[in-house]
Image (cartoon, grey):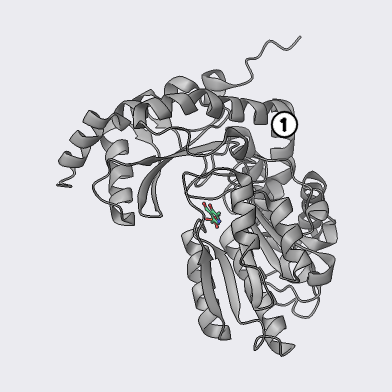
Amino acid sequence: MDKTPRFGHAIRHWWPLDTDIDFLNPASFGATPHEILAAQSVWRDRMERNPMHFFLDVLPLEVRRQASLLAEFVGADADRLVFVENATNGVQAAIWSHLRERRDAGKLSAEREIITTDQVYPAVRNMMRLAAREFGTGYREIHIPFPLSGADEVRDRIAAELGERCALLVVDHVASPTGLVFPVHAIVANARERGVAVIVDGAHAPGMLPLDLDALDADWYVGNCHKWMFTPKSCALLYAAERRAAHTHPNVVSLTVGKGMPAEFDYVGTRDCTAFLCLEASLEFMRRLGIDGMRRYQSDLVAEIRPRFSAATGVDTPAPHDMTAGMLAFPLYGARRMDSDSARQLRAHCYRTRKFEVPFMVHDNHMLVRAAAQVFNEAGDYDALLELLSEAEFNKVQTELGWN
Ligand SMILES: Cc1ncc(COP(=O)(O)O)c(C=O)c1O
């Protein structure tokens, strides 16, 4: 029997993480183990030994083969699943593809607005505002409170805003500021019923949550592999429903223009695609960890630290446990400042003086702290953070930062 400890600190050395920090934010940019980085180096060597052979003979076939493996993992038709460098890129391609098609079909005078929720990732907010200006639509955010009663509240608040005037709904699968898992099946079903196109931004979902994209039937789905699937940075997926694939185009026009999906996405100029080519290595790594066991460890760890966060912050559970998977956020009602610069200052202060990495974010005029539970974390990793969240300590830090 394999006696290797499967999770926690016993496997932390599989990652090149600095040993003197508690790394509580494997979510923002991911964390890639040595063995997958080694697989990437092998691909880079192959690329540089004969770039002509690599780009013309190897890469086209290999990108498709690895995309097929990913498609199988997320329950999608491989012809409609492509690699993009990151979720930002994929969401932008989907938004622009859809709005161009609606404009060209003369539909944008009736479908006058694009909507999302106020838990939207800030870069997606920026691109939606820009798209609204470029395509002459309105832009609106549906308020999703936090603390929150449950998934039905998210579903109902969104359903209440869907109508004929909506050209597009963009909704998160796992919301960035709160880490909450939104009920995307119900949200997509409601949108489809009302004839509203929907992009699901699943930046945090692949790896963290089981996915069946064909069954979900969103018009587009975007997900990162570099966050919770352990691939090197710059590996993400864009999926289009069959009804959308023909007018789904990359943000950059290249040699493959007019060839449709997936060819237009598979080649967009000379770039380093080696992160895409590590998909197979990442699947092997996760399968060796045990995919169900990995997800159970992450959500059990979140369940274990949740009451400790409640005790430290004095906030009762801000959302039901069934809305969380690998991440957990709490509002800090004692915060004296609530803007993104202050959130960045807090993070930097924690790293500099207390040696842990955790993000602070502002949502709905509250400062939130968000922790993530990866397979190399253990409950004790959060102790220094929890100590900081006690009222006296948090006040001390705010004073040290000059927040009077
Ligand atoms: C919901 C959401 N969308 C998009 C992104 C952007 O991801 P990337 O930086 O990989 O493009 C993030 C990043 O955290 C996110 O949380």
> Residue at the location (68% across, 40% down)?
209
Please name the residue shown 55% across and 50% down the image.
175
Name the residue nearer the viewer: 152 or 274. Answer: 152
Q: Position of residue 121 (x, y in %)?
A: 50, 58
Q: Is residue 202 visible?
A: no
Residue at point 76%, 56% (across, down): 63
- Secondary element at image label 1: helix
Crowd band around label 1 with a 10 angstrom C-alpha radius: few (<14), some (14–19), many (20+): some
Residue 157 versus residue 370: which sits nearer the camera?
157
Check disc 1 and give the amino acid type.
Ile
Residue 251, x across and y down, in percent = 63, 73
- Asked which quadrant contains residue 285, the reply is top right
Is residue 401 something that shows in the picture?
yes
Kindly identify the residue that appears in the image at 60 percent across and 21 percent down.
Answer: 7
Does residue 43 appear left or right of residue 400 in this picture?
A: right
Decide which of 380, 57 is in the foreground and name it: 380
Q: Quadrant of ligand 1?
A: bottom right
**Quadrant showing the N terminus:** top right
Residue 301 x, y percent position in the rendering = 55, 25
Write down the quadrant of residue 61 in the picture. bottom right
Residue that carries the numbered disc 1 in the rendered image = 291
Q: Is 319 positioned to the left or the right of 85 in the image?
A: left
